[in-house]
Amino acid sequence: MKLGLQLGYWGRGPIDEAPALIAAAEEAGFDAVFTAESWGSDAFTPLAWWGSATSRVRLGTAVAQISARPPTSVAMSALTVDHLSGGRHILGLGVSGPQVVEGWYGQPFAKPLARTREYVQVIRDVLAREAPVTNAGPHYPLPYPSDAPGSTGLGKSLKPITHPVRPDLPIWLGAEGPKNIALTGEIADGWLAIYYTPRLAPQYEEWLAEGLSRPGARRTREEFEVAATVQVVVTDDVRATLDEYKPATALYVGGMGAKEVNFHAEVYRRMGYGDAVDEIGALFREGRKDEAVAAVPDEMVRETMIVGTADEVRAEIKRWEAAGVSMLMVTARSVDLVRELGTLV
């Protein structure tokens, strides 16, 4: 089992303690550090800025949103960070959701699986640097078609000026549904799992196996990485910890997405919490947020996190590892906790 430090995206400003947390993580033996983005801070700038003070940990995005940049642009960012870090970059990508894609980026959300497949292929073609990059589309045509609206007809196929450090730079995908997880197994090098529960490991493994068995799949299961975002809390007061994290669960289930489409809510439905999801969502949409938080069952929080005494946490980490998780991505926000977690793995 490896540890990753998930710094996430910023709130109203930068994460003040990030440099100290990253230094502690590298000293404690963490394997990687990750940044994210929503509709505020971006993922690549903090990763490069803070990562410049490191020498060993891998530096990843978890996730960079594919609608934020054309695939050639994200390939440029990835090869740049990989150069600056001496070959330590992990490119983590995700489709986000329709509210962000259409509301913030002004792009259609339709066909996320097809867009992801095409996007990743263009990035791999850029990093391979074997020939000028072309792509027939339909989502990311290169060059821009001469008969398309607004075209000058002067588009030219290019390959990157800069030679990538690693043509096979690892690409991990954030995925929540069965089809997306299967696609991840087929075209990616790792899965960024959110709201993972060991209880459903056989189901996850079945979905991954479908993709890993497809013709042309990049990895075997032994080579493939599964990185699960998880809260790890060492405490004697489990009850207080569950109460502390219920507001975040209610927000993601009830507030992060529309009534018609909420991928986080669907994850919890597949866990068997459909009735709770309906109640939380209804209360949240009515503005009754305190009641929505109160409607979150204890087990709904507990089974997607690791909480307990040091011995209990150690045992749980072994259970997650046995379930197929190769990295725990923790959101520790204290140097002491980062150091303690390093001693538990």
Image (cartoon, rainbow, N blue to C red):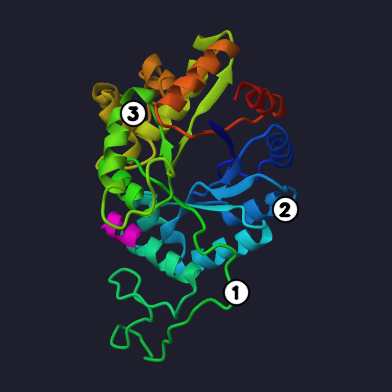
- Between the residue at mark 3 and the residue at mark 2, the CA separation in whole angstroms equals 36 Å
What's drawn in magenta, residue-wise? 109-117
SS for callout 3: helix
In primary-sequence order, the first of circles 1 and 3 is 1
Q: In the picture, residue 309 is in which quadrant?
A: top right
Tell which tag, 3 or 2, sits nearer the viewer: 3
For residue 106, say whether it is visible.
Answer: no
94 magenta-colored: no
x, y percentage for residue 219?
39, 49
Q: Note whether 340 is above or below 101 in the view shown.
A: above
Residue at x 37%, y 30% (from the top left corner):
287
* Circles 1 and 3 in contact, beta carbons < 8 Å: no
Q: Between residues 151 and 78, which one lies in front from this camera angle?
A: 78
**Neighbour class for label 1 at 10 Å: few (<14), some, many (≥20)?**
few
**Residue closest to the far top:** 236
Q: What's under tag 1, amino acid-wise?
A: Thr
In the displayed structure, 236 sits above or below 4; it is above
Magenta highlight: main SS? helix
Estimate the spatial distance between the alpha carbons at disc 1 and disc 3, rounded to whole Å. 41 Å
* Element on which disc 2 rests: loop
Disc 1 element:
loop
Residue depicted at x 38% and y 36%: 255
The amino acid marked with disc number 3 is Ala
Q: Which mark is residue 162?
A: 1
Image point (34%, 28%), residue name = 201
Near-viewer residue (297 or 146)? 146
Judging by the rendered image, the residue that carries numbered circle 3 is 201
Badge 2 amino acid: Ser
In this picture, residue 64 sits left or right of residue 295? right
Disc number at residue 52? 2
Q: How far apart are marks 2 and 1 (CA)?
A: 20 Å
